[in-house]
């Protein structure tokens, strides 16, 4: 399971949890503007926007899970198993892109959601695997800038682009169903609730009863509702530390603890990492399952005009501040 969200204060924040039972060897990867991005079906992209994100680098190629570019656009790929559909035949009228090229392609060329949509309308996503060991990932995408968020799904019928007014994405079912399901929770509130039982005296015996019925389980539909409720009710100061702190609180509401979701006998899905990007400033923050201290990488501290990837291994060991 995975959950992606956005959050706006003075700046615009974008990020996700990556929930899975094993790691693909991800690290923080910066793709500077002159790094040659090879494409399977067209010429390599020579000069482009700079990208920072979580990726695994194989044979020199940054296989991004999510990231942002230096213009403030964010893209995150989340599992969309049995629904994602890619083409086997090349198109003569559209640009052919292998599924694993989608995130670097969009982030290298689009500076906002409008430009991303223009590119996507002209794409034919191919089912070409990166290698025999890495088959295509079945994903759908949250794409957002500070003004607009969309969900993109490549399905059997073609490409679906949905406005995403919540700025949230999880996994199955398709996005229109996730959004419709929110109707069932429209009564949830952060306020005290009235007693509607007339003469019967009923006590508000606890704080937080306005959100009773908010689903607490780990299914993707329940995480969608939970993170939407938390995000849309979120309040924080608008400085960097307060915004980043609040962002992690939002995603921690759907954190997955080892032991609660068995995917195979004795194997459990957990939140491997949680990321948060300040899209205005090009800064990535992350925590990992075992390291609750927030680590940060600022793309603007690197030479963004270079032609070589910059890779930071994740700090995965717990940092405890022993006070005595
Ligand atoms: C497993 C990850 C998604 C996690 C997720 O959504 N979990 C939910 C599980 S469930 O639906 O609720 O069951 C996805 C997100 C990004 C994916 C990676 C990226 O797409 C980059 C490459 C793409 C290659 O084709 C496959 C390897 C890969 C390195 C992918 C491996 C894996 O599929 C990743 C890491």
Image (cartoon, rainbow, N blue to C red):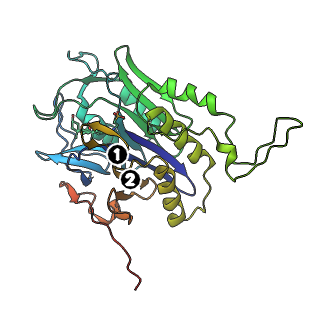
Picture mark count: 2
Q: Quadrant of residue 267?
A: top left
The image's mark for residue 317 is none
**Does mark 1 have its CB less than 8 Å from ligand 1?**
yes
Q: Secondary structure at mark 1?
A: strand
The crowd level at tag 1 (other Cα within 10 Å; few <14, some 14-19, many 20+) is many
Q: Quadrant of residue 263?
A: top left
> Residue tagged by mark 2?
275
**Residue 59 seen by the camera:** yes
Q: Nearer the viewer, residue 103 or 43?
A: 103
Q: Nearer the viewer, residue 277 or 304?
A: 277
Q: Are marks 1 and 2 in contact (CB under 8 Å)?
A: yes
Residue occupying the point 20% across, 17% down: 88
Q: Quarter of the image for the C terminus: give it.
A: bottom left
Question: Residue most toward the right?
Answer: 199
Say whether disc 1 or disc 2 marks the residue closer to the N-terminus: 1
Residue occupying the point 51% across, 23% down: 177
Q: Nearer the viewer, residue 160 or 179?
A: 179
The image's mark for residue 18 is 1
Q: In this rendering, which labeled residue sits more in front, label 1 or label 2?
A: 1
Give left or right: position of 186 versus 168. right
Residue 128 percent across, percent down from the top left:
17, 26
Residue 234 percent across, percent down from the top left:
60, 52
Q: In the displayed structure, would residue 304 be above or below residue 4?
A: below
């Amino acid at each position: 399971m995975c959950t992606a969200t956005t959050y706006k204060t003075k700046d615009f924040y974008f990020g996700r949890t990556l929930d899975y039972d094993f790691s693909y060897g991800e690290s923080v990867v910066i793709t500077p503007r002159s790094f040659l991005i090879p494409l399977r079906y067209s010429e390599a992209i020579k000069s482009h926007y700079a990208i920072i994100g979580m990726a695994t680098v194989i044979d020199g190629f940054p296989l991004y899970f999510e990231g942002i570019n230096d213009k403030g656009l964010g893209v995150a790929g989340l599992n969309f198993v049995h629904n994602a559909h890619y083409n086997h035949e090349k198109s003569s009228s559209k640009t052919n892109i292998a599924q694993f090229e989608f995130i670097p392609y969009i982030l290298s060329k689009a500076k906002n959601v409008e430009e991303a949509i223009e590119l996507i309308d002209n794409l034919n996503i191919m089912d070409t695997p990166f290698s025999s060991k890495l088959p295509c990932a079945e994903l759908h995408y949250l794409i957002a800038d500070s003004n607009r968020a969309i969900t993109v799904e490549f399905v059997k019928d073609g490409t679906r682009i949905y406005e995403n007014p919540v700025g949230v994405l999880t996994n199955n079912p398709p996005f229109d169903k996730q959004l419709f399901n929110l109707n069932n929770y429209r009564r949830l509130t952060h306020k005290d609730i009235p007693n509607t039982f007339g003469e019967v005296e009923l006590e508000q015996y606890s704080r937080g009863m306005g959100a009773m019925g908010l689903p607490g389980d780990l299914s993707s539909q329940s995480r969608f509702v939970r993170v939407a409720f938390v995000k849309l009710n979120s309040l924080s100061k608008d400085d960097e530390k307060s915004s980043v702190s609040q962002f992690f609180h939002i995603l921690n509401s759907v954190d997955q603890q080892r032991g609660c979701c068995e995917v195979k006998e004795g194997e459990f899905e957990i939140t491997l990492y949680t990321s948060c990007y300040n899209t205005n400033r090009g800064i990535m923050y992350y925590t990992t399952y075992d390291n609750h201290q927030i680590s940060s990488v600022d793309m603007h501290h690197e030479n963004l005009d270079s032609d070589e990837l910059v890779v930071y291994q994740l700090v995965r060991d717990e940092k405890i501040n022993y006070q005595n």
